[in-house]
């Protein structure tokens, strides 16, 4: 499997998983929306990196890698890279808390519908920008 094929597969998986966020939000599972959004963003960004010929590291936040390789991205995508890196950083910070919480941080009590909405919209934005790397119809 080529880097391009795997990158396309990552973006396809990320696109399909977006629907999960709506279901979780409707159920009031706001912390789960945040966690799943992080995974979607990570998958989409790693797919984007593969599509531009960069092997993504085994890290949850690849935002800095996007910025390091901005010259590999098409002109139309470059203006969005700072925003995508910001989203990746924010969701990476929330990753473990949203899933596991801590003794003084119960995820089901701490995350709000506003947090979920932000995470969902950010994930949708990341996937939308990354899909611009696919050929028309791809």
Image (spheres, rainbow, N blue to C red):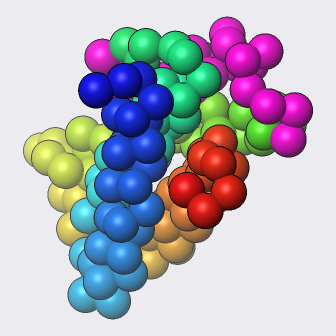
Query: Residue 136: x, y in percent?
Result: 68, 57
Query: Residue 55: x, y in percent?
Result: 43, 13
Inspect the magenta stretch and tell me whether residue 64 lies in it: yes
| Image point (23%, 59%), residue name | 107
How many marks are shown on the rendered structure?
A: 0
| Residue nearer the viewer, 67 or 3 | 3
Q: As drawn, is 81 to the left or to the right of 55? A: right
Location of the N terminus by quadrant is top left
| Residue nearer the viewer, 61 or 56 | 56
Q: Based on the displayed image, in which of its 4 quarters is residue 75 positioned?
A: top right
| Image point (72%, 40%), residue name | 83
Q: As drawn, is 5 to the left or to the right of 32? A: right
| Image point (14%, 47%), residue name | 100
Q: As drawn, is 72 to the left or to the right of 114? A: right
Inspect the magenta stretch and tell me whether residue 69 lies in it: yes
Query: Residue 85: x, y in percent?
Result: 63, 32
| Image point (41%, 23%), residue name | 3
Give the residues drawn in magenta, as a range: 58-76
Location of the C terminus by quadrant is bottom right
């Amino acid at each position: 499997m080529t880097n391009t094929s795997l990158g396309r597969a990552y973006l396809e998986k990320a696109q399909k998983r977006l629907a999960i966020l709506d279901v979780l939000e409707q159920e009031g599972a706001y912390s789960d929306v945040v966690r799943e959004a992080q995974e979607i963003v990570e998958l989409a960004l790693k797919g984007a990196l593969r599509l531009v010929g960069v092997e993504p590291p085994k890290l949850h936040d690849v935002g800095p890698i996007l910025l390091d390789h901005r010259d590999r991205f098409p002109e139309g995508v470059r203006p969005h890279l700072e925003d995508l890196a910001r989203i990746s950083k924010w969701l990476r910070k929330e990753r473990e808390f949203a899933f596991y919480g801590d003794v003084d941080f119960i995820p089901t009590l701490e995350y709000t519908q506003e947090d979920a909405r932000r995470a969902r919209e950010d994930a949708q934005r990341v996937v939308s920008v990354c899909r611009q790397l696919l050929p028309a119809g791809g």
